[in-house]
Image: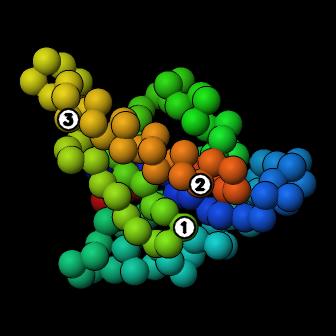
Amino acid sequence: MKFTIIAIIKTDQSLLPKIEKLPKENLINFMAKKLEKPFSKYSKDDENKKFDAWKIFDAIPTKKLLTNLDILDMFPDSIFTPDCKWIDSPEAFFHVGHSNEKEYDSWVNTAKETLQKYADNSFSLLISCRL
């Protein structure tokens, strides 16, 4: 099963413009190194396991992501915060319809509130995971 998460990486606000100018591949590799240790506990075979493999496919300043969140192909299933908190959606939203519209809207609001909390001093990593 494949799913998408957003991992938020805090940085100094004054460094955001410099980091954003890095070539995309360098930025993704730099951010991947920052995630290796905190993500390692979520790929082990125990009660914390969330995925078998992960790959960053984009890195965007969180403020910019918030303004463009609606253009994502698939809304993220989880958010990983800078304090290593994992926030999951209440269900996998493969299809949003009348039966789960309220739950989906609630998850979108939770995701937006979480991203807004870090919007001024972070990058959001869009990550494809496999379980």
What residue is shown at x 78% (from left), y 58% (from top)? 13
Across and down, in percent, residue 104 comes to 26, 32
Residue found 13% across the figure and 18% down from its top: 98
Which residue is labeled 3 in the image? 103
Question: In percent of the image, x 43 and y 54: which residue is there?
Answer: 79
Mark before the other along the chain sequence, 1 or 3: 1
Say whether marks 2 and 3 touch (CB < 8 Å): no
Disc 1: CA contacts within 10 A as few (<14), some (14-19) or many (>=20): some
| Whole-number angstrom distance, CA of label 2 to CA of label 1 | 9 Å
Q: Amino acid at mark 2?
A: Tyr
Vertical order, 74 against 33 (above or below)? above
Contact, mark 2 vs mark 1 (Cβ under 8 Å): yes
Mark 2 or 1, closer to the camera: 2
Residue pointed to by mark 2: 118
Q: Amino acid at mark 1?
A: Pro
**Disc 1: which residue:** 82
Residue 3 appears in the rendering: no
Q: Position of residue 68 (x, y in %)?
A: 59, 28
Numbered disc 3: secondary structure: helix
